Amino acid sequence: MLTQTADARPYAVPSRFNVRIGPENSIGLFRGKEKTFSPNEDLFSEGDPADCIFMITRGAVRSYKLLGEGRRKIEAFRLRGDVFGFDSGKEREFCAQAIDEVCVLTARRHSFVDAATGYETMRELCAVSARELRRVQQHTLLLAMTAPQRMACFLIEMLRRLGERHIVELPMSRQDIADYLGLSIETVSRAFARFEASGLISLPTSRHIVLHEPEALQRMCE
Amino acid sequence: MLTQTADARPYAVPSRFNVRIGPENSIGLFRGKEKTFSPNEDLFSEGDPADCIFMITRGAVRSYKLLGEGRRKIEAFRLRGDVFGFDSGKEREFCAQAIDEVCVLTARRHSFVDAATGYETMRELCAVSARELRRVQQHTLLLAMTAPQRMACFLIEMLRRLGERHIVELPMSRQDIADYLGLSIETVSRAFARFEASGLISLPTSRHIVLHEPEALQRMCE
DNA sequence: CGTCCGTTTGATACATTTCAATAACGGTGG
DNA sequence: CCACCGTTATTGAAATGTATCAAACGGACG
């Protein structure tokens, strides 16, 4: 029943545009072709040539790296409006995989990096890179916190990025969250249970979260 | 006795240069005035105007953030040859503090960011920013590991950045290492003791480390 | 020689992981 | 509509790793 909250969200992305459309990492001059991906389909893998940049117009993507012994580190969740895939080198440093049904705009990388595109575009790319840097720095601070704190940060982040009032519809599984926060899936689940028991949140379903006390969660993040 | 290994290292940085001098984050066009800092002296603090960039020509700097309850997170160690201080915003995100006797070259930030300096400089700044991004990403992967693994990564990193053959002279204290790796000082100390007991390293003094099996440590990092 | 500070070592407490079992959900086919 | 199944999520109990607390050690320096 809560699903419609997100589905009803009015949103449209033209296939060509030169305005900022998302809350994170937008590039004004972005132009690209639309492409869709099914759940768990790879947008690219580690080692692939890093020849294009993406902007998500629908769905969510996990950017991750596989470690030893079946461990996986999710480095970022890319959500609607996010621009990503600007790897510094020639090759991808991470895998990118669709979490749900995903629609993206792509643009060839060299069209941004070539001198011909001029100084302003270069500046924008620098800005994206800098924002990305801040995001990763924020994430390392998160990993220095306790499990409940990481969970609180995660909820606040999701509320900010895809929250509708005080309701969040998570596109990702508990395992995804665990791999993003550097916790076990059980700890994530228990943290949700604790938050609900404390009256901070409600969980109508495992993916739908109502934040009753976002300020309290916010305070936990420091 | 091991001290002379590092002190005798031949190295000179001219006060003006346009060549890459260090292994990390060098900018070719860097020009600046030399400045020195005593141990524990601040290069800058959080919130200061981010109006200049630094290149270290001598000593080591810790870049850190103070968290709640006397906790401190060291985000990076800046060593000789490193370029840093290119914050994306107008204000510093971190504090930078001299660990030992430090000598730096500084350059005003706007001289890099102004359109007048041209496209190439912009490109170089982008490259620095991208390298910095990769470094932070590497650091977050590190924080997902166990204590011995973090320690192994740390030793390998230090060997690469300031090692002479298989010997490392650490400029930083155990507390610094702990705050960098997200561990307690006791855990750091115990990890050193274990490595020594396993024959992986020797500790002639607490700051001088001989790596007998760098390959074994390297393997631990994955 | 004694003091001070950083480091090491030991004992205990705690948070989180791991292992194991149960429960809830989503889809499929009868 | 319901029964079945595989998957995902939750919950419990035990094991583990690291932090914390406390004390001893060591070198540098007056």
Image (tube, coloured by chain):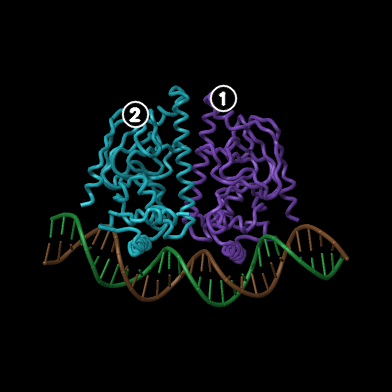
Chain colours: A purple, B cyan, C brown, D green
Residue type, numbered disc 1: Thr
User: Regarding mark 1 in the picture, which secondary structure is present there?
Assistant: helix
Residue B15 point in image, percent of width and height: 28, 30
Find disc 1 in the rendering and name its residue: A117
- Which label number is shown at residue B31? 2
Q: Is residue B128 above or below residue A194?
A: above
Give percent across and percent down for residue A19: 63, 31
Chain letter, disc 2 residue: B
Name the side, left or right, on which A104 lies relative to B169. right
Task: Tell me, yes or no, whether the two marked residues, 1 and 2, touch with CB atoms within 8 Å.
Answer: no
Dot label at residue A32: none
Q: Chain of mark 1?
A: A
Of the pair B62 and B47, the residue shown nearer to us: B62
Q: Quadrant of residue A193?
A: bottom right
Residue at the image point whose x is 35% and y is 49% from the top? B159
x 46%, y 34%: residue: B127
Q: Residues within 10 Å of mark 1 (few under 14, many from 20)?
A: few
Amino acid type at circle 2 is Arg
Horizontal and vertical percent position of residue B156 = 39, 51
Out of B86 and A219, give the one closest to the viewer: B86
Q: Residue at x 46, y 39 (%)?
A: B131
Res B114 seen here: yes
Question: Disc 1 versus disc 2: distance between alpha carbons?
Answer: 28 Å
Q: Is residue C1 left or right of residue B180?
A: left
Can residue A167 be seen? no
> Percent x, y for residue D13?
57, 77
Q: Residues within 10 Å of mark 2 (few under 14, many from 20)?
A: some
